Image (cartoon, helix red, strand yellow):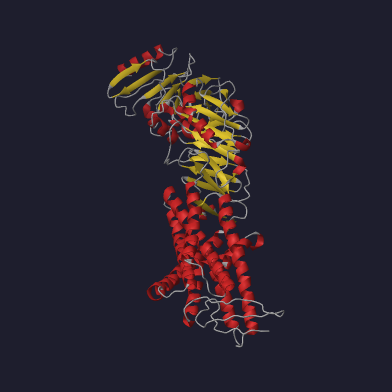
Amino acid sequence: MKQQSMMDWVLLVGLLWFCPFYLVRGNGSNNNTQGANPRCVEGQKRCFVVPHNFSGFLTAPNNWTYGHACLIFLQKCTTKMFLQVENNGESYQFNVTENQVKNDLRLYILNGTHCNTTMFNMTGCVFNHSDTDSCQIKCVQTKPECKEQSYKEGSCSGRSAKYRISITKTSCTCVNCKNPVKTPEKAIHLTQNISGEGGKVDASKAADLMKGMRKMAENLNESSAALSVGEDTKGIILLQPEPEELDGKSFVNVSPNDDMNFIDLEQNLAAFSRSVTIPKEAFAKAVSLNVTTPFAAVLRFFSLSSDARKSIVLADEVVAIELGVPITNLTNPIEIGFRNVNPKTIPTCHSWNGEGKKPNWTSDGCETVVNGDNITCQCSHLTFFAVLLAPPNETISSSDLNHLTIITQVGCGLSMLFLSVALFIHFLYRRVTASQATSILIHLMVAIFLLNLTFLTNSYVAKLKNSGVCKLMGALMHYFMLATFTWFAAQAFHLCLQLYTGGTIQIRYYMLKVCITAWMLPSIIVSALLIAGKYGEQVIYTDNTEDTVTMCWITDSDVHYIVNIGYYALVFLFTFITLIIMLYWLYQFKKVNVQVNQNGKSIATILGLCCMLGITWGFAFFAHGVLRIAAYYIFTILNSFHGFFLFIYYYNTSRSGEINAGVSNLNSTSSTSTLKTSLKSEENPYNNMSHQMINKK
């Protein structure tokens, strides 16, 4: 044996009954360092374990190329910092730390005689099952051996180690001693008042509470604490005091009403009803933004105050996450899991940035993953999170949505084309000689043209994800829709006034007053809603969350029903009564008409009146129950082609003469009914019939 090797062995024997030490050999020099560094094993890839009954020689050649290695004898002192090795006579027990497993530490257990580096392959790791060889070298690779093992409480009682490896002569087993569910070290009850109206949690106060979590973390002496606010709001705060050992964390509830605990990131979450997983990347970003003590605070708010749209929140549960600084654009998303929830309608993950007095939920930055009764929200930022459910009867199938979209695009495109032609003809040839009826019809065409234009471009604006532009687009489309409704009412008013005056309207500045009313009234309503912040992104739900689309529209459902449905209901009532009066007039006209074969023209007149008075929009009232889908199709077909129908009516009526209304008085001169009406051939836009009514006595 070489003199140098003999001196090495003598030194090792001299240190046999002391704590382990660190041996470094390489580059032709011999360096023996005693266990002054207690983290001898930390960061090493190889560790040689020498049992107490080993009788061989330990040698390392001068051309050693495997870098640093750690030589461990069976312990005589027990220190948590060391790789602890125990021997019960038949097996060796190794208590291994979590970092050692993460670093994939290799343990070479030496037994027998005359072992040296030439007798085994240092680049591999083979467990020698033989117990008769003169030199028995059993290699254990800790990461694949221990990483996938589940927690076994009975095998780890009284042990502080994270993993416990048991090696016999012929086998090797690893037991996971990490209890996956860890409870907070203390409980903190916060006295902050977060109550709002109607017994709900005030959203703005909840946001202020989350902003104060950083100060709480800085003053917390423990590494974790359970938080409670009021009766229903519960959560947890967890510190990671060593930034160099950051790791992702999951916060879980065994059942929805249980207190929140935390587990290691790699654990299976299927057994927990609620979970919040924060990746390591989020903590690292917090450190980079000058958070001295990385922490995570997670609170669950029940009955948070509603948003402007009165959105339905799954289980009435909102999850808030705070790391002390704004965290966005995560490549590894935060995951919020809801299991065994059985949503009745389409769920969609939303977030709120905590600004404002009411939540302003948005789906930006969040993906919704639905697997049976389980919902997972994957979000790239930290804030308030909730799963919003589509209101009942407001979801349609993806195929129906695609069909309706195609019909709408084709119909609105054709309507805009033909309305453009009609408007071009009017302003080029007939603007000067236009009658009052023609002017009202042209204004209606302009309103419908602009409504179709804003509708077709709405979805593209919504995709820009610019809240200011989206609000403006929603306000514009709403204005032109209300203007269209108002011009429907103006048409009905003009018809009734002509019937009442006998075709001659003697009101001064009549058209100016009609135009100001029809264009200004919607602007007042829209301006008020715009100032109140009622416009924004609206979601259209389908049975497939991937096909859900967005548009810029009114975000408050109450405002939608009052302003739109209520406004049109009044217009519809007025125009429908006008239609009945006109049909009655046509019926009386037919009774005294001396000409025949007017059925086709009468039908055309009725259809024209329906278009001008907006009666077709009334199919929206039937969009409920079993008639809902059918009403959607009828409503979409009739109203997307509305401009095209008006063009046909305008063209047909203009062929017989300039559109003008001249309906004479209906009066009674005796006990028997008398109909006295005179029509000029060029002055009947509504039925395109040229007749003279006769007196009937």
**Outermost residue, left direction?**
28
Number of marks in picture: 0
Residue 548 percent location from the top left of the image: 52, 54
Q: Residue furthest front?
A: 669
Q: Quadrant of the C terminus?
A: bottom right
Q: Quadrant of residue 291?
A: top left
Instruction: Spot the residue most to the right.
Output: 671
Q: Position of residue 49 (x, y in %)?
A: 44, 22
Residue positioned 62% across, 44% down in the render:
341
Is 145 in front, or is 186?
186
Residue shown at 47%/55% (left/top)? 523
Kindly identify the residue that appears in the image at 66 percent across and 59 percent down. 625
Q: Is residue 116 visible?
A: yes
Q: Is residue 336 above or below residue 617?
A: above
Image coordinates of residue 300 in percent, x first then y, are 57, 35
Horizontally, is 524 left or right of 287 in the view? Answer: right
345 sits to left or right of 421: right
Of the pair 88 and 657, the residue shown nearer to us: 657
The answer to whether residue 32 is left or right of residue 500 is left
Is residue 266 visible in the rendered image? The answer is no
**Quarter the N terminus occupies:** top left
Find residue 425 and report its horizontal and vertical position in percent: 40, 75
> Which of the two residues, 351 or 199, is positioned nearer the viewer here?
199
Q: Say if 240 sits above or below 551 in the image.
A: above
Q: Nearer the viewer, residue 260 or 156?
A: 260
